Amino acid sequence: MNAHTPPALAQSPQRYHGLDALRAFAMLLGVVLHVALYFQESPPDLIWPIRDIERSPLAGWLVVIIHIFRMPLFFVMAGFFAAMIHQRRGTGRFISNRILRIGVPFVVGWFILFPLVKFAFIFAMVRGGDTENIPAMSMAADILLSEGAWTDPGPMHLWFLYYLLILYVAALCCGLLMRLVPPLQRAWDAMARFIVTSRWRLPVLIAATFGLLTTMEMPGADTPMDFVPQVRVLLYYGFFLLAGWALWKHRATVTELHQGCWLRLLLGLLALCGSAILMIAFFITAFEGVGRDSIAAEVLYYLTQAAIAVTVWLVILGGIGVAERIMRRHHPVIRYLVDASYWIYLAHLPLCVFLPALFRTWDINGTLKMFVMMALVTIPLLLMWQAILGIVPSRRTSRQS
C-alpha cells in the first residue's frame, strides 16, 4: 500500500485470465442469488418480502451457499487488482481509475436503479395479491409516485461498491502514513509476506477470519442495509481486501497455489456444504426451536462461524489455483462474459425482482421455473451489453482493471 510508486517500475505484461474469470463468476452469481431469493421455501422477510407460488427446495441452499463465499472472494479479487493498478499506474492514476470504475457507476447507478428496484418490489407485492400484470404495473407506478422514488434510501446490492470506496480511501491513507513512518512500511511488508507466503498461511487466515466473524449478529457476514457504514463489516471485508493486496505484492504465490489446488477446492466445497448445513440448523434452532438466546443456538453460531472461516479460504485459495491453472490463455467466450459481468452485476437487480413477479402464475415446477427466470434475466442484460459495445468504443481487452 505504498503511497508513492517509483516511475521506473517495470510494467508486467502478465494477464491473470483465471482471476479475471473468478471475479466475473462471483459477479454473475448475483443473478443466481437474487432470483433464488424469490423461490425460497422460507416465509417472506424484510430482505425479500415476496415469494413465488411455486417454491424450490434448491433455492434456499443456493442462497446460503452463495452468501457464505461470494463476497469474501469479491474483496480478495478487488484487493489483488487494486494493488496491481496502484503499482503499475501510481497513486494519481489509481485514484482516477477507481473514481471512474467504482465511484461513478455507484453514484449514477444508484440514482437510476433505486427507483427501478423500488418499483419492481412494489409490483411484485401487488402481483402477490393475484392482480393481473397490467393493473399491477399501473398500481405499482401510482404507489411509487405517491411514496416518492428515492424515499427510504438504501445501497441495495451496490453496497459492495460503497464499502469498496471506503476501503480504498483507508488503504491510501495507510499508504501515506507508511511513507511518513518507514517502520510501519516494514511492518506491513513483513505482515504481507507472512500472510501470503508462510506455511502457517491457512491457519492464520482462518483464525483471523473466525475472530472477525464472531462480531456478526448472525452466522456468516452481515449485509449492510443502509448508508451508515458498519465497522464490523468494514473490518471483515477489509481483511479480505488486505489479503488480496498482499497476494499481488507476493504474486508468485498465485503460481504456487497451482499445487494441490483441486484437492484444496474439493475440501472447500465439502466444507461449504457443511457450513450451509450448520447455518440452516442455526436458523431452525434460533427461530423455530428453542430460541436465539439458547445455549444450543449459541453453540451452533460459533460452530457455523468457524466452519465458514475454514470454508472461505479453502474455496478462495483453491479457486485461485484452479482458475489460473486451467485458464492460461485468452478464451473469446469467457473474455466476453468477463467484460459483461460488471454490467450484469450493476443492472441485474430490478429484473431479478420484476421478471419472476411477471411470471408469478406460470404453473411449472418451481426449480425449473427458477432456472428459466435466471436465463430470462441474463439474456436481455447480455443483449443490452452488446448494444452498449456497439455505441461506445471499447478498449476492454487492452488492459486489466
Image (cartoon, helix red, strand yellow):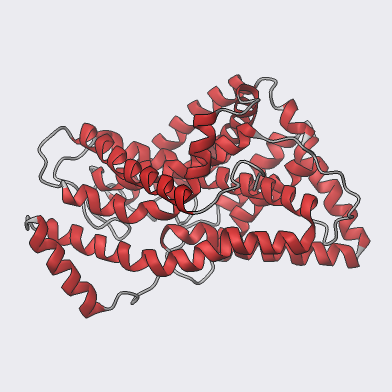
Question: Is residue 166 left or right of 249 when viewed as pictured?
Answer: left
| Picture quadrant where residue 116 is located | bottom left
Q: Residue at x 77, y 54 (%)?
A: 89
Instruction: Please state which of residues 187 and 389 is positioned toward the viewer in this rendering.
Output: 389
Q: Quadrant of residue 62?
A: top left
The quadrant of the picture occupied by the N terminus is: bottom right
Q: Is residue 386 above or below residue 16?
A: below
Residue 282 visible within the image: no
Q: Is residue 105 above or below residue 73?
A: below
Residue 56 appears in the rendering: yes
Question: At 28% across and 41% down in the image, what residue appears?
Answer: 376
Q: Nearer the viewer, residue 334 or 123?
A: 334
Q: Whole-percent x and y of residue 341?
A: 48, 44
Residue 353 percent coordinates (x, y): 27, 53
Q: Is residue 167 left or right of residue 361?
A: right
Measuring from the top left, give residue 230's x and y in whole percent.
Answer: 54, 66
Residue located at (33% from left, 58% from top): 47
* Location of residue 250 by image quarter: top right
334 vs 399, left or right, is left
The residue drawn where x is 35% and y is 42% is 378
Residue in the foreground of this view, choosing between 351 and 312 = 351
